[in-house]
Image: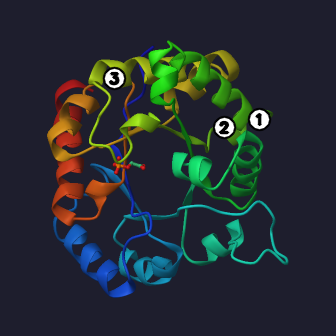
Amino acid sequence: MTAPRRRPFIAGNWKMHMTVPEARALVAGILESAPRPDEAELLLIPPFTALTEVAKLLQGTGVGLGGQDLFWEERGAFTGEVSGAMLRDAGCSHVLVGHSERRRLFGEDEDTVLKKTRAALKAGLRPIVCIGETLEERRAGGTIPRLDHQFDADLGGFTAEEMASVILAYEPVWAIGTGLTATPAQAGEAHAHIRRRFEEKYGNALAACAIILYGGSVKPANSYELYREKNIDGFLVGGASLEADSFIGIAREALRADREVK
Ligand code: PGA
């Protein structure tokens, strides 16, 4: 299948890092050397407390803003939670759903991910739904069944129109924050499979346009080779998004690969 040309999509998940002053400095560094919006799509995903300030700094730059999580209800007595409408109000266009840290540390199961994805779509946010296998699953040959299971359970029942807004992030759990990266071949195989799943369920046209990101210890030194894989459309970056040089370095390496092979 030949996918239509799309820009590299590079998202920086800051996790629980960055006070407001730190966020300001990081954004300034990123904006100083960011590729043009027509070359690459950049998305910053700060903690909730820095969203409003980062939104102000990003105005008119073409760099997007996302939330790290949301709750599935629209409002109410849910201490500590944030709704999709609140994220929209803070300037977000995207939101992470089902990150493996949420699944592992906060007990989020597939039903939670499904409800949050639905809530994101309802609020007009593009959900970035994270899926991926553990090391035990990979060693037991269970990577593809795991991905299929998550794809079906996390995204069950959505229409093709809704799915057109969903971004998938393949993040092998064993590669997140560990310094271990999937090889381009391993990541490429998982991405090709996810795109085939899209195709089987929602047809060719949608699958060809779907954005499928890779995440797990992405850094400037490995992003060129990873991005050369035809089904990798960009990256969800954790640790390396906390410094402007490495975050922009990843975008530039993806762009270099994009110009060469896509
Ligand atoms: P990492 O995190 O780049 O630090 O491995 C990726 C992620 O959690 O999305």
Residue neighbourhood size for the residue with mark 1, other residues' Cα within 10 Å, grouped as few (<14), some (14–19), many (≥20)? few
Residue 14 appears in the rendering? yes
Q: Amino acid at mark 3?
A: Lys
The Cα atoms of the two marked residues, 1 and 2, are separated by 6 Å
Please tell me which residue lies in front, 148 or 36.
148
> What is the count of numbered marks?
3
Residue 73 placement, left or right of 95: right
Residue 97 visible somewhere in the drawing: no
Name above or below for residue 206 compared with residue 78.
Answer: above
**Amino acid type, callout 2:** Met
Q: Which residue is mark 1?
A: 159
Question: In the rendering, at what x and y percent does residue 179 appear?
Answer: 26, 42
Q: Residue placed at 38% from the left, 71% from the top?
A: 17
Q: Is residue 81 above or below residue 161?
A: below
Give the residue number, with chain letter if any, for mark 2: 163
Instruction: Classify residue 79 by image quadrant.
Output: bottom right
Q: Position of residue 161 (x, y in %)?
A: 71, 38
Q: Which residue was labeled with disc 3?
A: 230
For the residues bearing labels 1 and 2, Cβ distance under 8 angstroms:
yes
For image coordinates 67% across by 75% down, the residue present is 86
Marks 1 and 3, how far apart at CA: 26 Å
* CA separation in Å, label 2 and label 3: 21 Å
